[in-house]
Amino acid sequence: MTSSVPPPPAAGRLAEIEAALRRATKQRPRDAEAHFRLGMVQHQQGRLAEAERCYRTALRLSPDNTDALNNLSLVLEQSGQLPEAEALLRRALGVQPQKGLLQCNLARLLLGQGRLEDAAAIFARAADLPEVAAAAQYGLATIRQRQQRPAEAETHYRAALARDPRLVDALNDLGILLRHTQRDAEAEESFRRAIRLRPDFAPAHLNLGVLLLDRERLDEAAAAFERAHRLQPDAADTHYYLGAVARERYQREAAEAAFTRAVALDPRHAAALSMLGIMEQEAGRLAEAEQMFRRAVAADPAYIEARINLGTVLSRQRRDAEALAIAEETLALAPDSADAVNNRGTLWEIEADFDQALAWYERALALDPRHPDANFNHGRLLLHLDRWAEGWEGYEWRLKNKRQKRAFFRSVMWDGSPLEGKTLVLHAEQGLGDTIQFCRYAPLMAERGGRVVLAVQPPLRRLLGDLPGVASCHDVGGAVPPFDFLMPLASLPRLYQTTRATIPATQGYLRAPEDAVARWHARIAPPGAGLRVGLAWGGNPEQSNDRNRSATLAAFLPLLELPGIRFYNLQVGPRVAEIAELGLGDRLVDLSPHLTDFAETAAAMTVLDLMITVDTSVAHLAGALGRPSWVALTFLPDWRYHRSGTDNPWYASQRLFRQPRRGDWASVVAEIGAALRRAAARQETA
């Protein structure tokens, strides 16, 4: 903010000056000015102990030398000797009470100790002195911003800049304030103005990058962070934000490397530690994620996001009591944090106390009406409670959540205008099951006119390409034909104001390719040889609720022992290994080598008599085909299965079997087994 120690001259010149001053102090040992100037040279080089000795010598010779008092206070401040540093500045002000430099340095020292009002009073007096008015106004702005008084802070920043338009620190900090008050265009101009004045000012490049990243201008943000990195290659924040850009671009390895480098440079960088924890969690390494989140909380106990992430990973490990304790600690620390209040709502929901969960989500929205997670959670819970009209509005907020964003979202979203002569891309943005569930709306969209194109996950492309009215089907991560508008598939129920009574195509809307069905007739035993049942016991392990919704093959063992039933495996991925591990190759025919995409799985289901599955894409596919399917549900299932009942309003051919208590798969399997015995008996007598 202020200082009386000028920047050092070139190294060679500095050595010459120091040598000359040493000769002067030897020749004139009582020359206070020579000792003072030698101290300044040493101070400029960071040799604080030597500088301190010279300044103290100068003060013994000239006790009222205010420059020496000021500079010695700076040395003591740098070495942590704050009380003496303050005393020296007050002593200097006793000699020159109107010297602005001394006033500002004392105010800055007090500010660094958190004595905000004491510092503000001194800055206010200094603001009347022309030589330090800009610095004093800047100091007042810093204090008011720290006190979360943004209007006053802005007034002082602008007063500082009126007195010194080239004060880049004020421009940079004003930009931060403007960004936090959602005045992004003004903030961007403030950062760019600072950069124009000082192209080598790294903080302005960094803060400009943060703003551009928030506005999803990734290429510009990356360029700003790269410039900041070139100027300060060892700044942890720069590496953190380079990692954030890489993560937005789905460059996992680059993101992880950047976050790791940030932590190497600053082992207490809470945001980078938390991001590494999120990446560990996404990879299913929950113990490692927990360790990272605990390190982040230890580094910054007030970092709410890290606390919430720690609670989430504890909950995913079914350590609910610990997760609740963390949530309560977080609320005690930040009772008015919408993040913390929303997080408490999720824990009430996990406990199936929906009234409490709803109340806490509404409390979070009272604190921050535009909180993406609270709006989404509120809407999703309303859907779970059959309050569909309100629920769809909240469900739309999933698109505001950064974890859900896709590159597609940066394009033109359809606004409901006429589609004649236009191309509309309906695209996936959630899981495979969600795409299957909501693609039923594509034919309805085609009836509105225009050309409807689907962009879906690659395993679904062949199957969904035959939906009526769909002009073409493409990979969601690849190229699509030129288009006019976009619409996420999961936003279509809101568009159609869907209620339980108006869900379209509940009897089935997908059909397996006929040639594939013919192949599967040859692979599966013909009718009459017993009930032919397909089985899937697990979903995508990376899904956030997978530990609850998925079972193990061992849980379904009682079914495999039932007579008169032939079981076929519909599971794919790493869980298929459970068949061999349990020695069940003779009781469960493994179809997985042939289930190369969902068109093949659909063909297998078309031939089978019944599907038994947990809540996974297999369940959605069976329902969308209109094939008989029984779904084993966790105690707290996804919203689309609602709270009770054996029917699924989205799929008429589906029957639901619910856990009576958390984790109780045995009761579910026993109920399914009884129903299966009855079904097998009916087939035998048919």
Image (cartoon, rainbow, N blue to C red):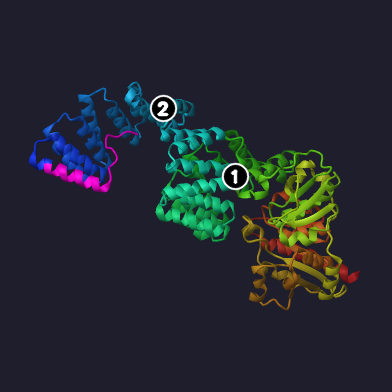
- In the image shown, does 287 or 221 lie closer to the viewer? 221
Front residue (pair 310, 74): 74
| Residue 58 locus on image (x, y percent) | 15, 36
Residue 110: x percent and y percent?
32, 33
Q: Give the range drawn in magenta.
A: 1-23
Secondary structure at badge 1 equals loop
Which three-letter amino acid code belongs to the residue tagged 1? Glu
Q: Mark 2 points at which residue?
A: 160
Q: Is residue 119 visible?
A: yes
Q: Residues within 10 Å of mark 1 (few under 14, many from 20)?
A: some
Determine whether 172 is above or below 261 in the image: above
Q: Does residue 322 appear in the picture of this structure?
A: no
Give the Cα separation between the discs numbered 2 and 1: 32 Å
Which quarter of the picture shows residue 532? Answer: bottom right
Q: Nearer the viewer, residue 179 or 660?
A: 179
Which residue in the structure is indicated by mark 1?
216
Residue 584: x and y, percent?
69, 76
| Left or right of 231 in this view: 501 | right
Q: What residue type is labelled 2?
A: Ala
At 74% from the left and 76% from the top, the residue drawn is 587
